[in-house]
Amino acid sequence: MDIQDPQNTPDDTKGDPGLTSATGATEQTDTVAGVADTDQRQPTADAQPPATDSRAASADEAAGLAETAPLPVLQSRGEAAATRPMADTVADMAQSTSAGAPLPVGAEIGDYRIVESGAVDARGPFYVAEPKDAAAHPEEAAPGLRYIVRELTNGASDQLAHIVAMGLRHPVLLTPVALAREDGRLFLVSMEIADEHGVRVPPMSVGERLRPVDALRAGIELADALATMHRNGLAHLHISPAEVTLYDGRIYLSGVEDATLAATDDEARPLFARDANFLARTMGVIGGVLDTPTLDEGTSAQRSLREIALRGEASAFTRAEELAESFALTLQMLASAGAEMGADIRSVRLAITADAATTVGLVRAANQDAYGLACFNVYDDAAADAPVGVFLVADGMGGEAHGEIASRLVVRNVTAEMTRQFTLPTTSWPAQTVFDPAEAVANAPGVTLAQALELAVKEANRQTRAFGQRLKATTGSTVTALAVSGARAAIAHLGDSRAYLLRDNQLLQLTEDHSLLARMEAVKHPMLEDPNFLVPRSVLYRSVGQEDDVSPDMMEFAIAPGDRLLLCSDGLWDELAPQVIGQVMAEASSPRSCARDLVALANASGGNDNSTAVAIFIEAEAEDDAVEQRAARGFSAETQGDASADAAEAERAQDIGDALAGAEAPDTEDAPTSAVEDASSSEPPTSAE
């Protein structure tokens, strides 16, 4: 493991498997929706800064400044939108309007432009649109994703307006993205999936099915999406194959615009449980297992998926997270038992290389950035989801006391807590399945990947608050952390450090800046038009150490071979345009060269702050060519007496499947695969191979 406190270091040290449909075609899965980079407001020569020099601002102060003027009807996406007042806009949107003349191609609806007109479906006329600023909508990288515009002649309900304002963001959610009024007419802009001919992709209710093992994997993504809705107080309440779409190996959930906003926790619990149970049954239908006569028939994957579906039918699940854990645990148990997973599952072994660079810059006297890299890997017959790693950047607040110690506390505590709560349990757990499957189920790791990361950040916040109390002064830090277990990834984020993903030559910003300026830009605050008004870019309203209880932004997604990720402090992205960052990431020969080139360019562009880059490259692990060589020589496993071993493996898979029946899956999102790999900034890049 490499945990770097740059203030003690010289400045110059500085693919997910495809979902396979019933036809047998393997396709690439998953995409990540991000937030495109927003140009930062530059201060004018005569602008005067506010009295405070602190980077931290209370949430109340930030919200107060951002909400002092009327807000436009157009609801932009993002976390800041969820905080905006809705009273004025909701009343306006609820008014009925008469349908007007058809919109021509080229007409502008808020931030969108009509590109196709004249289409009609069961819900009435609609238009196909594109963002006027494509860079602000990086989610378009998802194959087949397009925006459609419908006129709302009956106005918009309070709930729809709130859903749009929440700016929900998840790789598999097809969400409403904007409400806009033009010439007295109200329009809704939302996402949908269309094929290469521009025809809307039909839902899975029309009959397409997944292999059971792929239905299990898709279930994890859909359950994660439901959990995102639930964390925002939304119950879907329409989960069925009619709301699930499969295209180009990616699974999507629609119907978000018809979700129900739960007013209280007591109201929410049964609604969220209903969603989870309906999804369990839906995945049974999509996996084609509900017509299996008994659990004793079919493959291990079929029996396990059917058991989950039947538990949903019996209303056994209480949370979407519980269902996701059940799907993930089942997959891991099947892999550990050598069950019929299919070549696409067993071959999805990823190799992760990571390295970092940091610099004090050309202006600052000390480096208050810190970073950490830790990657564990085990290679054996059960390591279907290896490797396990955590990577993070923390930027101590320059305006606070001992920012360099705050960033040190964050990096070391997050790394240590992730190792204790997730990495070590998942590393040892597969060995337990060898002796007693039932006991292994009972002793499975107690938290999921995302849960462990969130708990680790909260522990870092507790330690930072304790340090501030000892100093009798406020101290704080940002944190942007990436945790990986096999093809699964989670991000925890507070502050204005950033995470980027380069996928298919598209650079996506995965985090949103928790700065006052970013919030005001998100709501298009009119004060930003005043050339004499200056908001320092560095004033934060959310950070580590700012309050006793923090809840970081969390995001879960899948990684795939070819992905490249970057974690960086604001001193880097403030100096370099997104195009430059993307180009360096794409052309770099290794994570080390990527990180070093980025911090060098930041210095060359001014070096006004400390800058740190952590680069993580994802590749497919090299295949063992001895298998093909043996096949070429005519080697037969059966003639070597392996048939009996295969029978023993099948029997063990049956035992594990039986142990799963009726068991309530414990928390484990990407069950165990790990091992021990150290990353060092003074050695070649980490390779978890």
Image: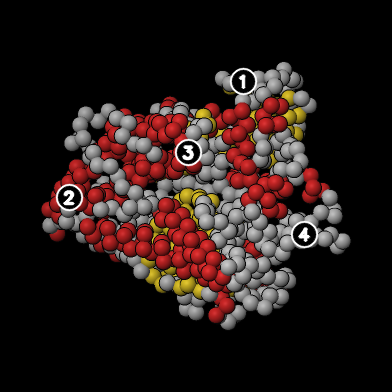
Would residue 166 appear left or right of 677 to someone viewing this image? right
Badges 2 and 4: C-beta atoms under 8 Å apart? no
User: Looking at the image, which residue is at 55% across and 61% down?
Assistant: 545
- Of labels 1 and 4, earlier in sequence is 4
Identify the disc placed on residue 124.
Answer: 1
**Disc number lying in front (1 or 4):** 4
Q: Which residue is mark 2?
A: 652
Check the picture and name the quadrant holding the N terminus. bottom left
Q: Residues within 10 Å of mark 4 (few under 14, many from 20)?
A: few
User: Looking at the image, which residue is at 84% across and 59% down?
Assistant: 47
- Of labels 1 and 2, earlier in sequence is 1
Identify the disc placed on residue 50.
Answer: 4
Would residue 240 appear left or right of 408 to someone viewing this image? left
Residue found at the far bottom of this picture:
10
Q: Nearer the viewer, residue 102 or 169?
A: 169
Q: Secondary structure at mark 1?
A: strand
Q: Amino acid at mark 4?
A: Pro
User: Looking at the image, which residue is at 86% across and 62% down?
Assistant: 45
Q: Secondary structure at mark 3?
A: helix
Q: Residues within 10 Å of mark 3 (few under 14, many from 20)?
A: many
In the rendering, at what x and y percent does residue 27 appear? Answer: 44, 45
* 177, above or below 331, in the image: above
Q: Amino acid at mark 1?
A: Gly
